[in-house]
Amino acid sequence: MAEVVRALRLYWRLQRAAMRGALQYRLNLVIGIAAGVAYQGSGFAFVWVVMHTFPAVGGWSLREIAFLYGMRLTAHALYVLPFSSLIGLDWLVREGELDRVLLRPLNPLVQIMAKRLGVGQLGDLLAGLVLLVVALPPLGPASILFCLAAVVGGALVEAAVSLALASLALRTWNTLGVRAFADDLFSKFGSYPMSVFGGAAQWALTFVLPVAFVAYVPASVLLDRTGELNVPAPVAYGSPLLGVALFALAYRIWSRQLRHYQSTGT
Amino acid sequence: MIRVESLTKVFRRPHTFSGPLGPLRTLLTRRYDERTAVDGVSFEISAGEIVGYLGPNGAGKSTTVKMLTGILTPTSGLIEVDGRVPWRDREANARAVGVVFGQRSQLWWDLPLIDSLRLVGDLYDVPAARFAGSLRRMCDLLGLDDFLQTPVRQLSLGQRMRGDLAAAMLYDPPILYLDEPTVGLDVMAKQAVREFIAETNRLGRTTVVLTTHDLADVEALCERIILIDKGRVLYDGGIDDLVTAYAPPRRLVVELADDETRTFEIAAGRPIPELIAQVAAEHPIRDLSIREPDLEGVITRIYAESER
Ligand SMILES: Nc1ncnc2c1ncn2[C@@H]1O[C@H](COP(=O)(O)OP(=O)(O)O)[C@@H](O)[C@H]1O
Ligand SMILES: [Mg+2]
């Protein structure tokens, strides 16, 4: 426990130092935030178009889809916000930057996470939360708790996939492409009722890449639609735990691969 | 304090093919390129020693240091630092060692030096009162006051190196690893670094492993050197013993009338006057001197012998 408190404290100190460093390049920061806002705007426009073009996708009402979309967007933002520096892992490894991290008495993943905060995702987070609240079905307190757990669980599912793939960068594999591809699958397919994709695709998006568990499965629980899922209802109810389990597994893979880190020649 | 036995590191990388289909072939063939950087190295270092780890470029010095710090996992062999296995117990090991890589700063590039030092203090859980004392001492020893508030990226190489030394010793680790700390520095800065190392070792009985290919560092600081080449230990022992054991012949250096300089080896047991007489008979001598074997000569000779 004391270890966790220490890690959190140091995470915050390092994160603040990273932000102070980033402030040295004000123009970059401004451009980054502007790009984030613009991107978010286009995302909203996209949802709006989709919702008006297909008011009822796969038998789901507009409001239900907005709720699903909100869950997935919130989960995604919650994953990117702390893990945005994983994107640069290939580079960190190739440049031998990881040497510095491994010299310090603090968990390497915490140090890497502290290199950057995905402030560009604050827009996503806000948008997701607004959608969630606006489209929230009438829920009891237990269901609200489930909803919160599910959003965190969804973030952990995405984080787990990202971390497991990023671990391969420690073996000097080029992982950027495959990670971008996985991210793309999550954002393209994560916010739709999967029943519209049909058997094989739905199966793959559930059991091969667990896209369905980020939002579709828990949203079905909250919207009382577990009947149409391709997993049994108890599994659907346990979906927030899946995020925790997958992340624990990904963390093990990461720790293993860390031993294979080869540093650089110069 | 430090025990290393049959330490070996083999780097293994996927073989890269050239040509347009290169990346694909790399992925499909699973062929690997192997390079043995450290090859069965053994040594022991006791508390308070300053040991020079000496070798030409590519000898395996940095790779050894990276294994000692736990950055790299050995391919085989054993390392124990203060009873710990660095790669397995990386964080505990990190608290006990200070590390400086001459080629790569450990400081936060975009922040003032003082911020880096504060962060190091945080990371190593140095209590505020002790931090203030340590910082004062480092500033005095290394003359940091003038550039404490300067962003690291604006520091000169010599200033940056002093900052790195401070960061490495701020938490009083009993062991200090220095990987080519004087590389690229001017004479003054080199001198400052050497004085700091000597002082640290004298005051705190810090154990120092100093990697270098600059003999002057070694001559100024170390009583013992470990000489390596191609990942193997060629010599481990005192510098004085090294010079006697491998003593190359003394040399007679003569300057001839036409400004030419010639050197003659003085064969063991041959009377020097006799040699001088012989040389004088053949050449018009303007000046002459006898050169004692120096460390550089000895080491050049050891490398030459190991090539055969
Ligand atoms: N990360 C690495 N991957 C592959 N080869 C490496 C790596 N690091 C070092 N080498 C190789 O191992 C040998 C020893 O390197 P190094 O330990 O850096 O030598 P030194 O520090 O004595 O100059 C060199 O041939 C170098 O090219
Ligand atoms: Mg080196």
Image (spheres, rainbow, N blue to C red):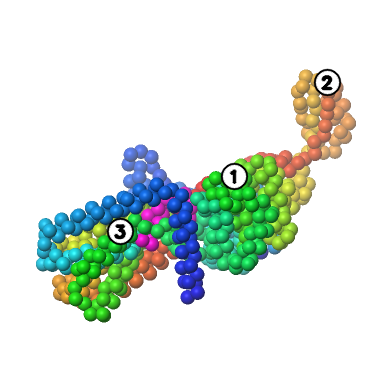
The residue stretch that appears in magenta: A81-98
Asked if ligand 1 lies within 8 A of label 3, the reply is no
Is B149 rendered above or below residue B80?
above
Q: Is residue A94 magenta?
A: yes
Q: Position of residue B259 (x, y in %)?
A: 77, 22
Q: Which residue reaches farthest top?
A: B258
Q: Amino acid at mark 1?
A: Leu
Q: Amino acid at mark 3?
A: Gly
Q: Nearer the viewer, residue B62 or B40?
A: B62
Q: Amino acid at mark 2?
A: Pro
The residue under the point 40% across, 64% down is A253
Nearer the N terminus, badge 1 or badge 2? 1
Which SS does the magenta portion mostly show? helix
Determine which residue is flagged by label 2: B284
Determine which residue is flagged by label 1: B157
Q: Nearer the viewer, residue B292 or A179?
A: A179
Q: Quadrant of residue B95?
A: bottom right
Determine which residue is flagged by label 3: A123
